[in-house]
Image (cartoon, grey):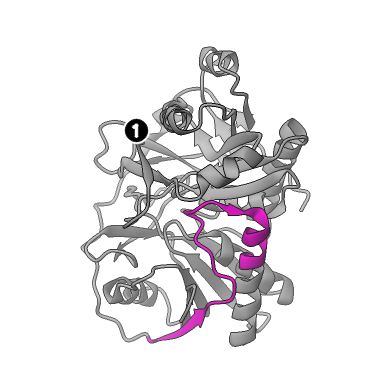
Amino acid sequence: MNDQFTIDDLVRVAKRENNAKRSYLYVNPFQGKHIPAPPGKVLSLFGQLQELLEQHWGDERLLLIGFAETATAIGGYLAYRAQNAAYFLTTTREETPGAEVLPFTESHSHAAEQKLILDGLAALVPDVQRVVFVEDEVTTGNTIEKLMEGLRRHFPALRFGILSILSSMPETRIADFARKGVPCVCLHRIPQNYQVETLEVHHYAPPPPPPSEKTSLTVRELILSRAAWDARTAAPTAQVRSGCDAFVAEALDKISLPQSVERILVLGTEEFMLPPLLLAQALQEACPEAAVRFHATTRSPILTSPDVDYPFHNRAALDSFYAPGRPTFLYNLAQYDRVYIGTDAPKLNPGGVSSLLHALEAYSKPAVTLLRWRASP
């Protein structure tokens, strides 16, 4: 895993559907979110961010916060691997009945309302020397600043940092954060509105029809319950490691290993990405000749185009695994022999499963296994 990723490797520009606040989206082909990617490439990229985390804050005990949806796996992997990561949690857009939450908004997002669960934070904050917000791409820093201000109201002594793969924050904005004691670290800086003009040359396809539940595919459902934890609530990184390792070990115990020539997709659902990503890497290591890809469903509505230099060529409209009637999407589907779907949906929406099977069936008839991660069966 010694890949060196350039800006051209990591940046694709895509057009959001009907978003007047921000018409474009930066898409990273090696992040394993919107675009299917080899798991080894994804982890190699995340490993470079881990090196930055240890380099800049190596002598501090950190609480890492990954942003939903796109940075949950990034933050989680840093918590899983980095020596200076002590605790981890993610923000969430899911309903959190009974939890004490800190709400904030992501102004340019298709789903602007986010929250951070505060349960358990007061007990661990005295053991934390800095909170580091982990993102795939930071444009203005406004969303992070809103969350930072909210946390300061609860915990005035906290110190903060920002770590991202990409950043297009202006120098003046970075200097402003520095004056407030908030260092901003990234793998690559890009200019504001980088390559956005390229969106004008593409021909865009109309949005797909509403999700369909008609399918002849069947799914094998397995419950994985060893050491499950919810990343939306703060936990020690030892629990992150044991939970992810248990997910992978239990999955490998219950599924048959693929044949070496097979095409395999491991798919996360929305905010649930890290355990399936690690499973994808384990499958690739067990069967090095197999073509293993990883990515995840998403709430982001993005336009597609047949143009070869545009990042998205097909889009399936799905019903969410987590909430009936909530639009969810899957991009760049292809032919696969096996598909492993990982989800932590507490009450699985049957319509979400059948709409995903319908989408898969449009390209092939794979053997499909659903891996449900639950604290108890």
Locate residue 285, reporting x and y percent.
Answer: 73, 71
Which SS class for mark 1?
A: helix
Above or below, 85 against 211 in this view is: above
Q: Nearer the viewer, residue 118 or 340?
A: 118
Q: Residue shown at 34%/53% (left/top)?
A: 299
- Magenta-drawn segment: 218-244
Task: Answer with left or right where residue 267 lies relative to residue 58.
Answer: left
Is residue 60 found inside the magenta-colored segment of the image? no
Task: Find residue 219 and report its image quarter.
Answer: bottom left
Locate residue 97, reporting x and y percent.
Answer: 31, 57
Task: Find residue 6 and report its image quarter.
Answer: top right
Task: Answer with left or right where residue 31 lies relative to residue 207.
Answer: right
Q: Residue shown at 71%/48% (left/top)?
A: 47
Judging by the rendered image, the residue that carries numbered circle 1 is 200
Q: Residue shown at 68%/80% (left/top)?
A: 260
Task: Answer with left or right where residue 106 lies relative to residue 275.
Answer: left
| Viewer can see residue 289 | yes
| Viewer can see residue 336 | no
Above or below, 236 against 224 in this view is: above
Count all numbered tags in the image, as a single digit.
1
Locate residue 46, reporting x and y percent.
Answer: 65, 48
Locate residue 284, reporting x and y percent.
Answer: 68, 70
Task: Answer with left or right where residue 294 lies relative to residue 252.
Answer: left
Is residue 234 found inside the magenta-colored segment of the image? yes
Q: Identify residue type, mark 1.
A: Glu
